[in-house]
Image (cartoon, helix red, strand yellow):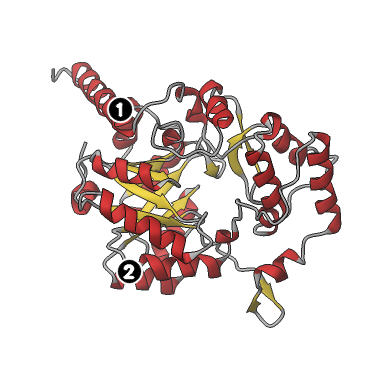
Amino acid sequence: MQTELSKQLGVEHAIFGFTPFPAVAAAITRAGGFGVLGAVRYTAPDDLKRDLDWMQDHTEGKPYGLDVVMPAKKVEAPGSQTLTEADVEAMIPPAHREFVRDTLAKHAVPELADGEASGWRITGWMEQVARGQLDVAFDYPIKLLANALGSPPADVIDRAHRHHILVAALAGSARHARKHADAGIDIVVAQGYEAGGHTGEIASMVLTPEAVEAVAPLPVLAAGGIGSGEQIAAALALGAQGVWLGSLWLTCAEAELHSRKLTEKLLAAGSGDTVRSRALTGKPARQLRTQWTDAWDDPQGPGPLPMPLQGLLVAEAVSRIQKYEVEPLLGTPVGQIVGRMNSERSVRQVFDDLTRGFERAIDRVNRIAGRA
């Protein structure tokens, strides 16, 4: 399952696996794919350094990458001075904080213990935090830097290129893909509407060939709604040079989900059990539909705040929901492919299924074309 891009990166299969879990990312790389570690949850540089050290020790010298989140627009104070986290926190309206308190009280969600810090802080959405992550990452032999919110700033692209690191950017439309190409990135990840996390409004079957045509000869990775070898074959037939898979790894044995109840919800969910909501970060992101997303999407409520305010607003609430496994509110970003995620398997087993499905699809097409 090789393409020009996979050969360039020295991987056996053109499968790029995004995950927040180092054990999963390393297993993807060892299985012959390209593991990409998500950095957004790392608020302390030493924690990222620890896990990149671990990746170095568990990837057998094979390539891997890092995914950061650098918003296209910074939150700035008057005079174009970047705000601190405390400054941003102060911008959150009291009515929104009251809405969070009322929603948690309605579901009897316990408080965190005295002195217990929120374990879910997405300050990584803020550019200055992501830059700190990059200061760590560039000391490691990563081969790919991906940005989940479009093209990174020009100086970051230049810095990556000086380290001989390819730069990828996620795009939800052909227009976005062209902007990324103009910014000097190396790979476009065409992420369809079906994908987990931040997505646009165009489905993968439409978006992939549009992006391929828009940025040729730059390589395009297809993302969104892909969870079988047959779907990988379809993506490559549409012109992609690989696939970008994220949701599929959440129920793998190596994943470190914080909650057994959440794993069970994912295993039981169908493809119609997700929703594209701003409840988590302030930008539309596909996730499990829960009573938490329903509350934020209710027109009678105050509505989500823009990024990064929403993420800071709900950080403690999400930590409490996760810690106490409050089932009606418990969710996670995940794509519509969740309907196929109905058993716990190792990363290696997932890879075996993907490669077998790919071979079946190629055989089928060859028979149709009279080549078998």
Rate crowding at label 1 as few (under 14), some (14 to 19) or many (20 or more) other CA atoms within 10 Å.
some
Does residue 278 appear anywhere in the picture? no
Q: Quadrant of residue 144?
A: bottom left
Which amino acid does the dot numbered 1 rest on?
Answer: Gln
**Image quarter for residue 161?**
bottom left
Residue at left 59%, top 60%? 123
Name the residue located 35 percent from the left edge and 68 percent from the top edge.
138
The amino acid at mark 2 is Asp
Residue at numbered disc 1: 349
Q: Position of residue 164 (x, y in %)?
A: 26, 67
| SS at circle 2 | loop
Identify which residue, 125 or 271, lies in the foreground: 125
| Residue 355 x/y as whole percent | 25, 28
For residue 38, side relative to residue 122 (left or right)? left
Relative to residue 133, is residue 100 depicted above or below?
A: above
Evaluate if marks 2 and 1 touch, with contact meaning CB atoms under 8 Å apart: no
The front one of 357 and 105 is: 105
User: Measured from the top left, where is residue 50 in percent x and y?
Assistant: 39, 59
Considering the image in quadrants, where does the N terminus appear? top left
Is residue 234 visible in this depiction of the protein? yes
Residue 71: percent from the left, percent from the top? 55, 61
Left or right: residue 180 compared with residue 110 = left
- Looking at the picture, tell me which residue is in the foreground, 336 or 260: 260
Measuring 32% from the left and 69% from the top, which residue is drawn there?
Answer: 139
- Residue 139's tag is 2
* Element at label 1: helix
User: Which residue occupies 24% across, 49% down?
Assistant: 5
Relative to 53, is 178 on the left or the right? right
- What crowding class fits label 2: few (fewer than 14 Cα within 10 Å), some (14-19), or many (20 or more)? few
Q: CA distance from mark 2 to mark 1?
A: 32 Å
